[in-house]
Image (tube, grey):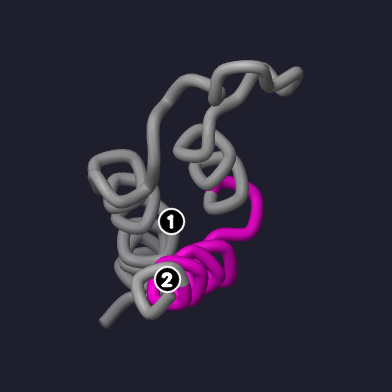
Amino acid sequence: MSAQAIAWLVLIFGFALPLVHVAASRRSGPWGPPPGSRCPLGPRAGWVVLVLFLGPLGWLLYLRARTRRERA
């Protein structure tokens, strides 16, 4: 496999698919901020930003937070 193909696979599976997963998941929360919040971003937008900047590590943080919330 060529280095270019490996680079594309890393981009797709490490960044694009996690971003799509967080943006499309209903369990990510609403796009808008909660009422009375001073932050202009909602929970889903915040997770998208984290995954955008941290890549696979941000996605793992999202998955960990989601499973913790489901247990409680």
For the N terminus, the image quarter is bottom left
Q: Main SS type for the magenta part?
A: helix
- Quarter holding residue 46: top right
Please say if 19 is above or below 39: below
User: Residue sitting at 29 percent across and 55 percent down?
Assistant: 17
Residue 54 versus residue 47: which sits nearer the camera? 47
The residue that mark 1 highlights is: 15
Query: Crowdedness of circle 2 by 10 Å Cα count: few (<14), some, many (20+)?
Result: some
Please say if 43 is above or below 56: above
The residue that mark 2 highlights is: 63
Q: Position of residue 69 (x, y in %)?
A: 44, 68
Residue 26 versus residue 7: which sits nearer the camera? 26
Residue 46 versus residue 12: which sits nearer the camera? 46
Specify the amino acid type for callout 2: Leu
Q: Position of residue 33 (x, y in %)?
A: 55, 23
For the C terminus, the image quarter is bottom left
Q: How many marks?
A: 2
Q: Does the magenta stretch include residue 63?
A: yes
User: Residue sitting at 42 percent across and 71 percent down?
Assistant: 63
Determine whether, in the image, residue 43 is placed left or right of residue 23: right
Q: What element carries label 2?
A: helix
In 3D space, how far apart are the residues under numbered discs 2 and 1 (Cα atoms)?
14 Å
Mark earlier in primary sequence (2, 1): 1
Determine whether, in the image, residue 62 is placed left or right of residue 71: right
Q: Where is residue 22 in the image (x, y as percent from the top left)?
A: 36, 49
Please say if 30 is above or below 14: above
Residue 33 versus residue 19: which sits nearer the camera? 33
User: Residue sitting at 24 percent across and 44 percent down?
Assistant: 26
Q: Which of marks 2 and 1 is in front?
A: 2
Magenta stretch bounds: 52-68
Determine whether, in the image, residue 4 is placed left or right of residue 58: left
